[in-house]
Image (cartoon, rainbow, N blue to C red):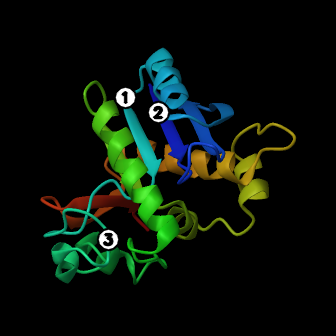
Amino acid sequence: MKIIGIDLAGKQENPSGFCVLEGEHLILKTLYSDENLIENVKKVNPAVIAIDAPLSLPKGRCCLEKDCKCAVGGHFRQAERDIRPYGRVLPLTFQGMKMLTLRGIRLAKELRKDFEVIETHPRTSQKMLGFKDLKDDLNQIYNLPDEPTEHELDGVLAAITGYLYLIGCVLELGDPEEGIVVIPRD
């Protein structure tokens, strides 16, 4: 069973961490464009793709612009409110989060044509899994390359969360009509 974890960057020019998890084996890459991400996903044909990025808008929002009539819908989805006891999240209307959210929505829409896609939050997954020093802790489980990037390591956390999702060991936070964030169960 192959699982993909993606630590998505807000801009295609910035590095996104990409992890393929198959049993005890990892493949880590740094990818950039949506096209390249989609191409690499299709080569793997995963059971699930776990993406570190918001993949939906708050209920009642048509966009994330502050001056739009939909702005009364708020800055957070129920998933962000539900995750607060476990980890810290930023409002989707912050500039960097807005770019990340819009890219995540586009990418997930394309990938969902052929694959199951879930949203995750690696910092919270890291906390729930009890990892203090991410690189050292992951190196005790997997044979990591010598110098994995922080984005690749977050891709590993996303992939682990995808695996836990497949075996039913997760919390699903949020409103299914609005968007669910998946994190490991403690």
Query: What amino acid is at disc 2?
Result: Ile
Identified at 53% across, 48% down, the residue is: 8
The answer to the question of whether label 2 and label 3 lie on touching residues, with beta carbons closer than 8 A, is: no
Identify the mark at residue 47; answer none if there is no mark.
1
Corner quadrant of residue 76: bottom left
- Which numbered marker is on residue 182? none
* 58 horizontally vs 183: left or right: left
Task: Tell me the distance, in whole angstroms, between the alpha carbons under discs 1 and 3.
Answer: 35 Å
- Say above or below: 159 vs 2: below
Name which quarter of the figure residue 28 lies in: top right
Up-down relation of residue 33 to residue 131 (above or below): above
Q: What is the spatial separation of the Cα atoms under label 1 and label 2, in whole angstroms?
A: 6 Å
The answer to which image quadrant residue 12 occupies is top right
Label 2 element class? strand
Which of disc 3 and disc 2 is earlier in sequence? 2
Q: Is residue 140 visible?
A: no
